[in-house]
Image: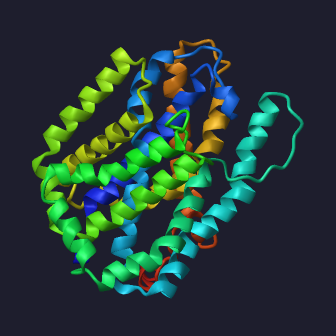
Amino acid sequence: MLPAERRYDIDWLRVITIGLLLIYHIAIVFQPWGVFIQFIQSEQSMESLWIPMAMLNIWRIPLLFFVSGMGVCFAIRKRDWKSLMTERSKRILLPFLFGVFFIVPLHVFIWQNYYKQDLNYMPNPSHLWFLANIFLYVFVLSPVFFYLKKNQDGKFMQVFRKLMKYPLGLLVVTLPFVLEAMIINPDPFEMYAFTWHGFFLGLLAFFFGFCFVLSGSIFWQTILKWRWLFLSIALAIYLIRLIAFDLKTPNFIMAIESNIWIFAVFGFAYKYLNRPSKALSYLSQGAYPIYILHMVFMFWGSVLILPLDIPVLAKFLLVVAFTSTSCFGVYELLIKRIAILRPLFGLKGKNKKEQSLKVSVSN
């Protein structure tokens, strides 16, 4: 059945994954190939960072797609197709277009200036490609989602719920991801942005994320019970990839490892994070604007910090501190408080009750 209450663990996973995205992007600055994907690159590398990065990189973006599909399942509880598309246009399409034309050109300008390129206004999706994919998935899959909503006891969901009772049933869910990896044959597997691999993998994750939530408590009880098994298997496959394959196993094994990591993450999050908190309330609002903004401040911080004559680890930590502090500062002082900016960064407008309360307090 459709979920009846808010799931705080899913909100936490969205926040945590965006936080990992920020740190991951900063780590690219300290890799010897960063400039080739138009990142500002440090002359001093920290190649050892690639070991944990490679572990995270095969599941952090797919996890976001799963979580986004779950979010749609929550969203359609009280919405029809028209209201869903209207809401997603405001929350996804509008920030995407604003970012393409007004945010991304800022960090492109910083990159061009740093590397003494011709300064050109260059609107493009850059890191916001994820939003475009999500909006397309909502548009393409919403007829299927509303059909499943109306037929929650139909044959498909009956079979799906039976599969979700057992850990081996989750391997059946993994099979489409394995087929995608074998058919598309991405090189490397972790290249999600602007690739067919990223599009189809995201489509699968988005769909199954919706189905996991629609299946009710069965999926969550299974991953809760078997979370340690999933974690052990995922860690074992990663260590084999690291030691025996120099981090490059065949793509179908990458797909299996990716999904098992995600099942483990869902299990531990359900166990320990499914509770409200003030920190979550604040961070869940700020995560979206920070995701949109972070590349600007990461590039700016790199320009200011990389030339300093200090150890490379100190540079990495300073770029992390500068980026996160600047993003939170702009969010707190400007985006959160200026009504016209809120929808441009994916935030809902302040409701009348909140505004009237603010006025009465000020009076």
Left or right of 344 on screen, residue 164: left
Residue 19 visible at all: no
Q: Position of residue 43 (x, y in %)?
A: 65, 15
Is 358 or 162 nearer to us in this picture?
162
Nearest the eye: 359 or 233: 233
- Left or right, 3 with reference to 242: left
Residue 45's x, y, as percent?
57, 16
Name the residue: 51% across, 17% down.
46
Furthest residue in direction left, as rendered: 225
Going 35% across and 72% down the picture, which residue do you hit?
73
Residue at point 47% right, 85% down? Answer: 81
Residue 294 at what x, y percent from top left? Answer: 58, 45
Viewer-nearest residue: 153 or 361 = 153
Where 310 sits versus 145, above or below? above
For the residue pair 148 and 135, the one nearer the viewer reads as 148
Q: Find residue 337 and report its image quarter.
A: bottom right
